[in-house]
């Protein structure tokens, strides 16, 4: 999507809009990530947050996906617990402060994406419960 001429100017209102703006090599990859996340988080609200697709449940953005020129990414907040839990599984990938990058020339790690999404869902539920109980 970095190569999309209007990328910096374009504001996305739906995930479909975001994926439609992707380059041809990126679009199927984003569709695949979307399907994996939706299967892992069937009750999550699919929305746009910070101009990228986001999956929200329990009042929390559980995970986000993004497309870039040379990779797709799975973003999550907070990151510390995810990095600790999946340390070994994440070693083959470049990571950033808020996510992990999956190179376009490699298959998506479906099981890892699913596991991270479900782990983050548990974190979101715990956070929501703490917030409700005032802890």
Image (spheres, rainbow, N blue to C red):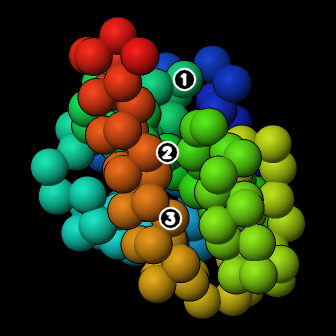
Residue 11's place in the image compared with 15, above or below, is above
To which residue does mark 1 refer?
A: 50
Q: Are marks 1 and 2 in contact (CB under 8 Å)?
A: yes
Q: Which quadrant, please, contains the C terminus? A: top left
Distance from label 1 to label 2 (Cα)?
10 Å
- Relative placement, left or right, of 86 versus 97 is left
Q: Quadrant of residue 5?
A: top right
Image point (40%, 31%), residue name = 127
Crowding at dot 1, Cα within 10 Å, few <14 / some 14-19 / many 20+, comes out as: few
Front residue of this view, candidates 131 and 33 = 131
Q: Is residue 49 visible?
A: yes
Image point (56%, 84%), residue name = 109
Q: Secondary structure at mark 1?
A: loop
- Relative placement, left or right, of 59 versus 82 is left
Distance from label 3 to label 1 (Cα)?
20 Å
> Quick one: which residue is furthest to the left in this view?
43
Q: Secondary structure at mark 3?
A: helix
Residue 70's place in the image compared with 13, above or below, is below
Disc nearest the viewer among 2 and 3: 3
Name which of mark 2 and mark 3 comes first in the sequence. 2
To which residue does mark 2 refer?
A: 64
**x then y, percent, for residue 107:** 60, 89
Image point (43%, 45%), residue name = 123
Crowding at dot 2, Cα within 10 Å, few <14 / some 14-19 / many 20+, comes out as: many
To which residue does mark 3 refer?
A: 116
Disc nearest the viewer among 3 and 1: 3
Name which of mark 3 and mark 1 comes first in the sequence. 1
Q: Is residue 1 visible?
A: no
Crowding at dot 3, Cα within 10 Å, few <14 / some 14-19 / many 20+, comes out as: many
**x then y, percent, for residue 2:** 73, 45
Image point (14%, 49%), residue name = 43
**x then y, percent, for residue 62:** 42, 42
């Amino acid at each position: 999507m970095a190569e999309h001429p209007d990328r910096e100017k374009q504001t996305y209102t739906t995930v479909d809009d975001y994926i439609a703006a992707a380059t041809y090599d990126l679009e199927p990859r984003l569709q695949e990530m979307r399907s994996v996340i939706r299967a892992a988080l069937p009750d999550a609200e699919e929305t746009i947050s910070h101009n990228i697709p986001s999956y929200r449940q329990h009042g929390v953005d559980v995970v986000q996906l993004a497309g870039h020129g040379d990779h797709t990414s799975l973003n999550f907040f907070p990151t510390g617990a995810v990095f600790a839990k999946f340390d070994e599984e994440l070693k083959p990938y470049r990571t950033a402060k808020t996510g992990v990058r999956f190179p376009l020339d490699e298959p998506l790690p479906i099981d890892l994406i699913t596991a991270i999404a479900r782990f983050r869902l548990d974190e979101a539920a715990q956070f929501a419960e703490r917030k409700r109980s005032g802890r």
